[in-house]
């Protein structure tokens, strides 16, 4: 699936996941096992749902949104294959 990564997603944009115990870049999402993708979606959804997170760390809040939306797209594609 790596050959399908759009140029915009090849720019270094990373998220430090506490549930996965490591940093994840946008392009890494395509290769994550489904269980890791599920954990990442849960973690980023939690960050986005708490308005205090936006005030505390706007950059992390925005990056969590990018990661969450791309993870949802990948998840939906996997479900149709």
Image: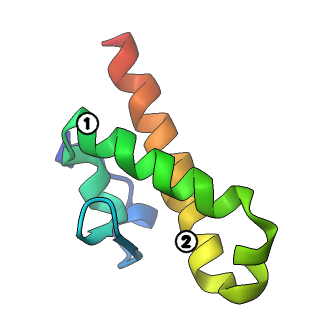
Q: Position of residue 14 (x, y in %)?
A: 38, 75
- Few, some or many C-alpha atoms within 10 Å of disc 2 (few <14, some 14-19, many ≥20)? some
Q: Position of residue 36 (x, y in %)?
A: 26, 45
* Observer-nearest of 14 and 51: 51
- Residue at horizontal 71 percent and vertical 87 percent from the top: 56
Q: Mark 1 and mark 2: span between their CA atoms?
A: 20 Å
Q: Is residue 4 above or below residue 56?
A: above
Name the image quarter holding residue 21: bottom left
Image-based side of 16 in relation to 66, left or right: left
Q: Quadrant of the C terminus?
A: top left
Q: Secondary structure at mark 1?
A: helix
Q: Secondary structure at mark 2?
A: helix
Q: Quadrant of the N terminus?
A: top left
Q: How many marks overall?
A: 2
- Residue at horizontal 53 percent and vertical 57 percent from the top: 44
Image-based side of 8 in relation to 57, left or right: left
- Residue at horizontal 41 percent and vertical 31 percent from the top: 75
Residue 35's mark?
Answer: 1
Report the residue marked by disc 2.
63
Dot 1 or dot 2, earlier in sequence: 1
């Amino acid at each position: 699936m790596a050959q399908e990564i759009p140029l915009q997603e090849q720019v270094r944009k990373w998220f430090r996941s506490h549930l996965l115990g490591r940093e994840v870049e946008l392009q890494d999402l395509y290769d994550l096992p489904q269980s890791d993708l599920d954990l990442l979606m849960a973690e980023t959804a939690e960050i986005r749902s708490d308005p205090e997170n936006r005030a505390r760390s706007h950059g992390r809040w925005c990056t969590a949104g990018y990661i969450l939306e791309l993870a949802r797209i990948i998840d939906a594609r996997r479900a149709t294959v």
